[in-house]
Amino acid sequence: MQAFTKLDARAAPLPLANIDTDQIIPKQFLKTVEREGLSKGLFYDFRFDEAGKEKADFVLNRPEYKGAGVLVTGDNFGCGSSREHAPWALMDFGIQAVIATSFADIFYNNCFQNGLLPVVLKADEVQALMDEAKGGNHLVTVDLEAQKVVSPSGKTFTFQIDPTRKAKMLQGLDAIGETLQAAVDIDVFESKRALAQPWLEDA
């Protein structure tokens, strides 16, 4: 997993509440366990019409938001089913951080396991970011170490995050990476067990 420290990127405003995981990545794109290529299905029903053509008015299709790395959105983002493909699709599209007033619990947890930073801000702060992102300057800074978001005009908003999750994100550690940090101790334990209980090796 790639470490997240500080991100300077375009912010795309998506002022909708209760966006569920089926809207983030519809079920027809869940036939793979590969993380690459899922961007084509991200917000598919928002991005494309029935003929498969891009909807010009959807924010991520508009030229000024192409390459956006931050999504600023509404309350309860990521609700619905617990599909891990949702953060995968966002990251494959280039989104590295999502800012909202709240997230669905399972989606929130999945974000940290995959290196996507979910940032919770107050409603007025999210609204301020959305308003600025709709203007001519879309560049924001998301600083995980300092736990702050800097708006295009320079306004600073601080956010809270669990210290353990923060440390893992800064180091780029998912569950497997965290386990591998104890690889030496695990090897020593297994060697000692093999000597003390050799019959278990044949089980």
Image (spheres, rainbow, N blue to C red):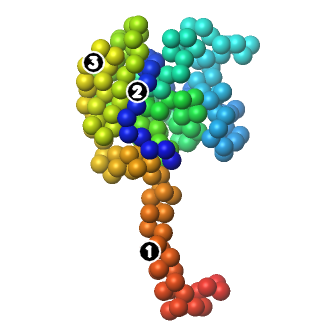
Disc 3 target residue: 154
**Would you say the residues marked 3 and 1 are in contact, meaning their CB atoms lie under 8 Å apart?**
no
Query: Could you classify mark 2 by the number of other residues whose Cα lies within 10 Å: few (under 14), some (14-19), or many (20 or more)?
Result: some
Disc 1 target residue: 185
The image shows residue 93 at horizontal and vertical percentages of 57, 29
Disc 2 target residue: 8
Q: Residue at x 58, y 33 (%)?
A: 92
Which of marks 2 and 3 precedes in the sequence? 2
Q: How far separated are the C-alphas under marks 3 and 2?
A: 13 Å
Please, what is the three-letter code of the amino acid marked with disc 2?
Answer: Asp
Q: Is residue 104 left or right of residue 25?
A: left
**Would you say the residues marked 1 and 2 are in contact, meaning their CB atoms lie under 8 Å apart?**
no
Q: How far separated are the C-alphas under marks 1 and 2?
A: 38 Å
- Quarter location, residue 158: top left
Secondary-structure class at tag 3? loop
Foreground disc of the pair 1, 2 = 2
* Up-down relation of residue 145 to residue 182 (above or below): above
* Up-down relation of residue 180 to residue 20 (above or below): below
Q: Residue at x 31, y 27 (%)?
A: 149
Which of marks 1 and 3 precedes in the sequence? 3
